[in-house]
Image (tube, rainbow, N blue to C red):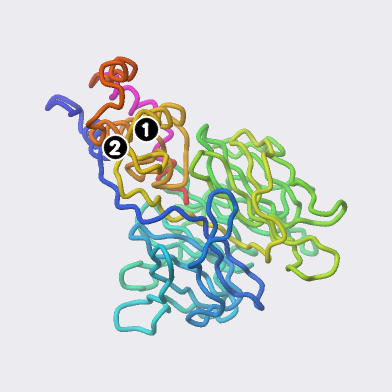
Amino acid sequence: MYCPDFCPSSLKWLFLTLLAPASPAFADLWAVSTDASYSRVIRFDNQGNELPGGIPSFSAGLLAPGGITVGPDGTIYVSSRGNSKILSYACDDTSCTPQGLPGGTPGEFATLSGAQPAQLKFGPDGNLYVSELFGQNVRAYNPTTGAQLANAASGLPGTGGIAFEEDGDLLVGTVVVPDFMIPATISRFSGGVQQAPFFVATQGELNFASSMMFLPNGDLVAVDLFADKLLRFTSNGLFLGNFGLMTPIIEGKPNFPSDIVFDPDGNLIVAVLGPNNPGDPGGNQGQLLRYSVEGHFLEIIADELEQVGALAWTASSETLAGDFNNDGDVDAADYAKWKGDFGKFVATANGADGNGNGIVDAGDYTIWRDAFSEPLDGSAFASAVPEPSTCTLLMLGLFASLGVRSRSFFRN
């Protein structure tokens, strides 16, 4: 597939983006054990089974971690609230090693003066953004040098979750302060300057957005830590009500949902604090819950965990391009997975997202097609799997990308 010389520059950019090669490492879900007595990051598979090789307790001084994200090069960043540091780790299939900056203390990426780091996300400009735990600012860092840049947001009453809109504007969740009649908000910043808010809550609508993400249709889902709810908003900030209700761990007791991410199949995984830890009286421990993209509760994938404060996916373990179901072969089953998942947002570089842009699109078909060299059943299989024409692929790319794909680039 190619874009002819007469294609507009925007379409040439689209083709280059869709066909960009990926360099995945492994497909694991990383869950932060936020209680200071554990201070580790647990590694899970997509079915909720704990795997070896997570980030060990107190590694590189990790203390009461609260946020996690994965950089484009696979580096894992964790916010260490207990000592106001952002730590970084290089991980492979079996272990994690404190990384830090060249020439610096192993594991230490940055130290926050006068604040504790909370949620971490990479922005569309490639910089690392860090919200302060119930603080006033969202800080920005150069991931290569560790240099602190100008604040992306300032002057807020208790920051929490962060997300990026299609145009690159930053959204920041803030906490309700009832004693001072300050409502919870989702504030908006552009170039560090506060804009008209995305949403200002009235009584009971929102208490604290600890995490936010955009859905394929453009709606925003906010995790309300203090109200045990997942809330839905339109892309213009219109409040639509509940996206999904939490399944009570113990009836009448709070769950404290903390974070939300896509999984490799385009569903959503929600982290739950609990707030108790294994062995504490009364149960009510942490969980990992799976929801459909429509907001329907699907299953508990992990239970009786330590308090889970944040989630992140590393890239797929595909060493074979086009092997979307990870069975070691590039065959009809991989095409079927691509076809079934086409248009879905997924955990970046997982499932049928072969080019690592966070959405299953035409570029992923190209990766499968180029890798598929020996049909299992000769002409019968070939006739069952027609190759889309250049025009068809262009239309697939446009439908999957324009108005949808750009948002996938901005989310975590």
Query: Residue 205: horizontal and vertical position, in percent?
Result: 74, 45
Q: With respect to residue 167, does 175 lie above or below?
A: below
Residue ID at (74%, 46%): 246
User: Is residue 307 within the magenta segment?
Assistant: no
Task: Kindly identify which residue carries mark 2.
Answer: 18
Q: Amino acid at mark 2?
A: Leu
Prevailing secondary structure class for the magenta stretch in the rendered image: helix
* Residue 174 pos. (x, y %): 64, 58
Magenta residues (range) = 391-406
55, 203: nearer the viewer: 55
Q: Relative to 141, say whether 364 is above or below.
A: above
- Quick one: which residue is furthest to the front in this view? 377
**In terms of secondary structure, where does tag 1 sit?**
loop
Q: Residue at x 50, y 79 (%)?
A: 59
On the image, the x and y values in percent for residue 284 come to 79, 60
**Residue of label 1:** 361
In the displayed image of the protein, which residue is found farthest to the right? 252
Residue 282 horizontal side relative to residue 326, left or right:
right
Residue 166 in the figure: left or right of residue 243: left
Q: Secondary structure at mark 2?
A: helix
**Alpha-carbon neighbours of circle 2 within 10 Å: few (<14), some, or many (≥20)?**
many
Q: Give the numbered dot on residue 167.
A: none
| Nearest the eye: 365 or 35 | 365
- Amino acid tagged 1: Asp
Q: Is residue 98 left or right of residue 138?
A: left
Q: Which image quadrant is residue 386 in?
A: top left
Q: Which residue is depicted at the point 28% across and 19% down? A: 382
Q: Is residue 116 left or right of residue 183?
A: left
Q: Residues within 10 Å of mark 1 (few under 14, many from 20)?
A: many
Q: Quadrant of the N terminus?
A: top left
The disc, 1 or 2, on the residue closer to the chain's N-terminal end is 2
Which of the pair 193/114 is nearer the observer?
Answer: 114
